[in-house]
Amino acid sequence: MAIGWALGLPDELLRSLAPKSVTAPVAMGIAEQLGGIPALAAVFAVLTGLIGAISAKYLFDALGVVPVQIRGFALGTASHGIGAARAMHVNSDAGAYAGLALGLQVVLASVLIPLIARIL
């Protein structure tokens, strides 16, 4: 969002970009609350999940992240449902941690993103 703001993107677009790191349905609800475009928020959320799920293995390997629990938790947090599915495909423990992270992240983001948006 900071990059979009620095580039001078319109407020409506920034409000649609804010919830990109939660699942698409939740992103749509948050974007609507913020005055963004729900459909665009869903697109940003899906793209975020896809990019994370595709690049995670390479990034984890490059950074030396080995424990499947950490990989799973990171995927669930950053790549939400798509990342959790990818983690489950790789290892059941990673999938469990991804699911836990996804649930926690959605609850926190649903509360914090609108609060932070009001402050800013």
Image (cartoon, grey):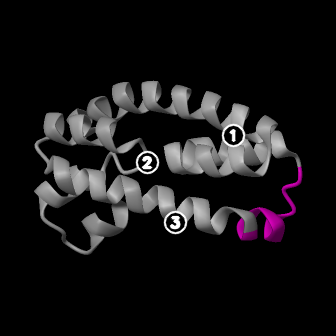
**Disc number lying in front (2 or 3):** 3
| Sequence-wise first label, 2 or 3 | 2
Nearer-the-camera pick, 34 or 103: 103
Tell me where residue 10 sits by quadrant: bottom left
Instruction: Look at the numbered discs 3 and 1 and tell me whether their residues touch, using CB distance below 8 Å.
Output: no
Whether 66 is drawn above or below 70: the answer is below
Q: Which residue is mark 1?
A: 73
Q: Please name the residue that numbered disc 2 is placed on.
A: 21
Magenta region, residue range: 58-66
Quarter holding the C terminus is top left
Closer to the camera in the image, 82 or 109: 82
Distance of label 1 from label 2 (alpha carbons): 14 Å
- Is 102 magenta? The answer is no
The quarter holding residue 92 reads top right
Query: On screen, 28 above or below 115?
Result: below
At 60% from the left and 43% from the top, the residue drawn is 84
Q: Residue at x 77, y 62 (%)?
A: 60
Relative to residue 71, is residue 21 drawn left or right?
A: left
